[in-house]
Image: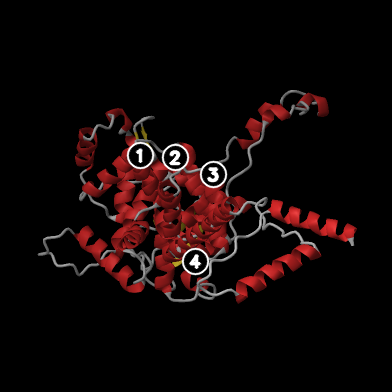
């Protein structure tokens, strides 16, 4: 693999011209996460070499690059290998006998733009593996161009004859004569290709998929290319790749959702990295079950105040992606996941800064706790925005926040019910009766009766209270005496 033997080994460069702005964007955003900054620096240094009419640079030695690349000859060689792996350069070695240090020809290739890059299984899987799905979608979003409604435009382009009046019509002959006799450069760009591998049996994968009910017409050349790319990037075996293909198969179309396939491969790789490597092979429990119990035990030590069911939800959100949990919940409700729901989940991943586990819990919260039938765009974005403003960076913080909100709602509901019950028991019209002020003669009569009751023996029965008729009769007698006197 290494063709660099000495710092004085010469090299020449062939390229077709400087990079455009959009090619630089592709190099930095799409290639740099895969190959590293040293490889990008080496690539740009080679592109800056002046070339002649044949697009060939003058011969130099590799030590002339040392002031621009910190390190040794090995770092330059490593950068070259990374550039060759992603198809950014092609290296040719001078042949012949008696050559101590053969000259290397670096044939520069332009970076692929976003569409061709994503269509390449090796490059797209390698980028997702390096960035993760959230950052990957953020990069893709930066390449989005707002659609244009051509119906709102009308063509106003003028023709050639309108502006330029030719003196003769022999331009085509002149153009042919100008280029005749010259060997003009024509170099097709070749992206990295995928060759068959000896340690992977693709026919075994096909048999598993067909046995599972996948239409054999779906299993075309692209499925094979994507499968081999995932095997090369992640090292998955036939069983794991068959599982990934089944998860990303859409039976309604029917077709393999390649974007979902790449994301699922990245998630499986992350899950495998997190699994403990010291589980005894003699254990009777499966590795995944032991890992889940270990995770729950760790969460129990971190959050002892949470219930067992809450800890299981935490562990689930740590292990499962939002898309997979959405699919499982909808299937448990005898429903299906729409394409809009998948897009809404991806929007949350691209626009918010919430961790993946919190995004997964958002799906669980809306579909299970709030019992929504679908994952709605407006509600999910509003809640995700609220959680991000509250800086809820873990599922435990979100659960605490949700529980507190539920307690607050119950308290307000209880206060409202208490007010309603109080209003029914003591209506506004039911007020304390106001005692009417008695006249002077009635007060004297009442005082005399009270004095008599006080002086009477305890065992003497209490005098009967005079009725209103008696009081009126006594009042009439008092008035009669007043007239006689």
Mark 1 to mark 3: distance in Å? 20 Å
Tell me the SS state at disc 3.
Answer: helix
> Is there any visible trace of residue 207 in the rendered image?
yes
Within-10-Å neighbours for mark 4: few <14, some 14–19, many 20+: some
The residue closer to the viewer here, 134 or 317, is: 317
The residue closer to the viewer here, 83 or 218, is: 218
Q: Earlier in the sequence, mark 1 or mark 4?
A: 4
- Can you identify the residue that label 4 sits on? 37
> Is there any visible trace of residue 90 in the rendered image?
no
Within-10-Å neighbours for mark 1: few <14, some 14–19, many 20+: few
- Can you identify the residue that label 3 sits on? 377
Q: Residue at x 66, y 27 (%)?
A: 173
Q: How is the image coloured?
A: secondary structure
Where residue 294 sits in the image (x, y, percent)?
Answer: 25, 67
Q: Residue at x 44, y 52 (%)?
A: 365
- Can you identify the residue that label 1 sits on? 333
Q: Earlier in the sequence, mark 4 or mark 2?
A: 4
**Disc 2, disc 3: CB below 8 Å?**
no
**Disc 3, disc 4: CB below 8 Å?**
no
Q: Residue at x 45, y 58 (%)?
A: 358
**Disc 2, disc 1: CB below 8 Å?**
yes
Mark 1 to mark 4: distance in Å? 48 Å
Question: Mark 1 or mark 4: which is in front?
Answer: 1
Where residue 62 sits in the image (x, y, percent)?
Answer: 47, 70
Question: Mark 3 or mark 4: which is in front?
Answer: 3
Where residue 122 sits in the image (x, y, percent)?
Answer: 38, 49
Tell me the SS state at disc 4.
Answer: helix
- Can you identify the residue that label 2 sits on? 373
């Amino acid at each position: 693999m290494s063709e660099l033997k000495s710092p004085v080994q010469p090299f020449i460069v062939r390229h077709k011209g400087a990079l455009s702005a959009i090619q630089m964007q592709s190099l930095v955003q799409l290639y740099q996460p895969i190959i590293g900054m040293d490889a990008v620096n080496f690539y740009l240094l080679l592109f800056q070499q002046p070339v002649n009419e044949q697009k060939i640079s003058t011969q130099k030695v590799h030590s002339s690059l040392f002031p621009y690349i910190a390190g040794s000859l090995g770092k330059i060689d490593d950068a070259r290998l990374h550039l060759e792996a992603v198809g950014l350069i092609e290296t040719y070695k001078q042949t012949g006998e008696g050559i101590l240090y053969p000259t290397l020809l670096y044939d520069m290739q332009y970076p692929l733009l976003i569409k061709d890059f994503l269509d390449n299984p090796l490059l797209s899987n390698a980028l997702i593996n390096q960035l993760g799905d959230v950052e990957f979608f953020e990069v893709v979003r930066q390449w989005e161009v707002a659609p244009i409604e051509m119906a709102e435009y009308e063509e106003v382009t003028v023709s050639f004859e309108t502006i330029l009046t030719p003196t003769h019509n022999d331009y085509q002959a002149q153009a042919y004569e100008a280029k005749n006799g010259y060997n003009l450069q024509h170099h097709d760009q070749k992206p990295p290709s995928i060759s068959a591998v000896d340690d992977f049996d693709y026919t075994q994968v096909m048999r598993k998929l067909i046995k599972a009910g996948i239409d054999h017409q779906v299993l075309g050349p692209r499925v094979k290319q994507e499968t081999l790319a995932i095997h090369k990037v992640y090292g998955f075996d036939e069983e794991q790749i068959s599982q990934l293909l089944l998860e990303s198969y859409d039976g309604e179309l029917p077709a393999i959702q390649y974007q979902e396939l790449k994301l699922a491969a990245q998630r499986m790789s992350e899950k495998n990295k997190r699994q403990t490597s010291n589980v005894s092979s003699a254990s009777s429990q499966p590795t995944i079950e032991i890992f889940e119990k270990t995770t729950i035990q760790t969460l129990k030590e971190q959050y002892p105040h949470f219930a067992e069911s809450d800890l299981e939800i935490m562990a689930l959100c740590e292990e499962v992606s939002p898309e997979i949990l959405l699919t499982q919940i909808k299937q448990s409700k005898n429903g299906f996941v729409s394409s809009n729901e998948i897009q809404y989940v991806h929007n949350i991943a691209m626009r918010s800064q919430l961790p993946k586990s919190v995004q997964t819990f958002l799906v669980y919260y809306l579909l299970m706790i709030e019992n929504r039938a679908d994952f709605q765009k407006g509600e999910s974005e509003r809640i995700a925005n609220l959680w991000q403003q509250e800086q809820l960076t873990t599922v435990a913080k979100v659960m605490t926040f949700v529980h507190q909100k539920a307690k607050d709602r119950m308290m307000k509901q209880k206060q409202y019910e208490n007010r309603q019950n109080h209003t029914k028991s003591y209506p506004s019209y039911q007020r304390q009766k106001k005692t009417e002020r008695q006249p002077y003669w009635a007060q004297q009569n009442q005082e005399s009766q009270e004095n008599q009751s006080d002086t009477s023996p305890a065992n003497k029965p209490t005098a009967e209270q005079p009725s209103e008729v008696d009081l009126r009769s006594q009042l009439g007698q008092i008035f009669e005496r007043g007239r006689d006197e």
